[in-house]
Image (tube, rainbow, N blue to C red):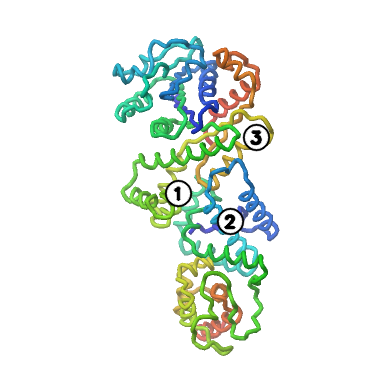
Amino acid sequence: MADNLLYDVLEVSANASLEEIETSYLRILEELGTQSLAMYSMFDEHQVEQLRARIEEAYLTLSDADRRQAYDLSRTLSAKATGDSRNENYRDQAALSDDRVEIGDLIQHPVAEVTAHLMDDVAEGAVRIPSSSPSPSGAGVRSVSGKRKRLSTVALPNITPETEFSGALLRQLRESCEMSLDELSDATKINKRYLHAVEENDFETLPAPVYVRGFVSEYARALGLDPKAVRDSYMVLYKRYRGSGS
Amino acid sequence: MKRKIIAIGGGKGGIGKSVISANLGVYFAQQGKSVILLDADLGGANLHTCLGLNSPQRTLSDFVSQNVQDLKSLVIPTGIPNLELISGAFDFLNAADIKHTEKLRLLREVTKLDVDYVIIDLGAGTGFNILDFFLIADHGILTVVPEPTSIENAYRFIKAAYYRRLKTLEMSWNLKSLVESAMAEKGTKGLRTPADLISYVERRDVAAGASLRKEIARFPLDLVVNQVRTAEERKLGPSMSEACRKYFGISMRFLGAVPYDDAVWQAIKQRKPVLVDNPTSHASEGIREIAQSLGMEKA
């Protein structure tokens, strides 16, 4: 997956301000919407919808400070991990063009479908954009509209405020939603390897705590769980492993 | 200077390919370069008319029917110094149905022509014959007019040309099989934009993806917008170029726009190239600018 993908989709630099992101997002949507002669017949209706969903998805992540930070962190780590191969990728990209929408990704990513539905529901006022504050329901479960199964409708182990969110439990919850690790990776923009490490409580592979907190928050958010509750619980386990916390 | 082959296509008929081909030829000839114009619009040849040549003694049809070996023996003078024509006039009724082996022979001979510029006027449509001539060019110029029908044909042409190129490219076995499976995938009707395709291949094989990316980048596509009447229409060129880059991953260089100009149809009626009939007209200026952009190295 190209490292800069979401920023490229919105045609902004990686350190663009929120205002720049919003402006660019609106401009690109408008471009797609108008019956511009220059793009006549380039795409069929289905492709336009997919392109739109892709743009909405990028905006959802980059316009939210927490999600953007988690995304940026995972990009940095991916870059370090892949090292030379990434440089080669960039060289080739520079030869062609840096900011190119990979429409092929649209066809593969189911999350774009989910996002599209989510946007409809947001427009109708039915769903609040996720925030950091814990939900009043205490169990940390919030409804997520869209095609994916709701956690609240699935038979789960009893989740109480005392529940320890270990990696194994997270995996169990993920599988209850019928979400694959690939799908979760797409949804959170976090490398599959780190998500897997979170599930395995593989603290050796996981990087510094500040990153792990971000990963776990995003994991929780993607499942419709309260990020803070899950994160705090997971970090207890993490610190226990690491001895004195840092 | 190294010989350049320029092909002019556009998918749609009647948008000025022959006029632009002929006048580009005139321009380079006026600059002292040796130019051969080739009328590859099999079944619809017009170049001889644009140049006011009545009954060419030798034509492209002879290449096939007389089994002529050397294309140079078919050139005829145009009356303009340095400019010669291989005409398509009087082609037989099924000229467009040229046999595959004959086409290959013709393509080979075109690449052997020893002049500064070979300018090929392609026909309308996106058939294999047209695409193959387009793909041997160093510069493939797409011509459009600011109408949705023309734009539609242009994008169809771009996609057709790129698929044709992929089919005929020398590829490593791995890349070839990935491309084939991408094209065959259900739900996409085998049609993918170039950017799509690169994405698909890259995800499965980074090296093959990189090599495919390089090939697509080498696609030598230029754009000319003809019959422009308003400032808005002038923007069409850069907009299409940008859209192509963004969404197709193809770099299409906008060369320039030719304004709609009465001088053009007046010249055609006179059966003279507008650069000769009315060299100070706006259309002539536009064509000269385009020729000059062509001369510059690709960015």
Residue B96 in picture, x, y percent from top left: 38, 26
Q: Quadrant of residue B205?
A: bottom left
Looking at the picture, do discs 3 and 2 lie on one chain? no
Q: Which residue is mark 1?
A: B192
The residue to which callout 2 is attached is A52
Quarter of the image that includes the C terminus of chain B: top right
Q: Residue B234: name its quadrant.
A: top right
B56 vs B44, nearest the viewer: B44
* Chain letter of the residue carrying label 2: A
For badge 1, the amino acid type reads Arg
Marks 3/1 same chain? yes
Q: Position of residue B165 (x, y in %)?
A: 40, 39
Q: Is residue A40 left or right of residue B93?
A: right
Q: In the visual, does B163 lie left or right of A56?
A: left
Q: Say what amino acid the circle numbered 3 marks.
A: Glu
Q: What residue is shown with label 3? A: B233
Three-letter code, disc 2: Arg
Q: CA distance from mark 3 to mark 1?
A: 29 Å
Q: How many marks?
A: 3
Q: Is residue B45 above or below residue B127?
A: above
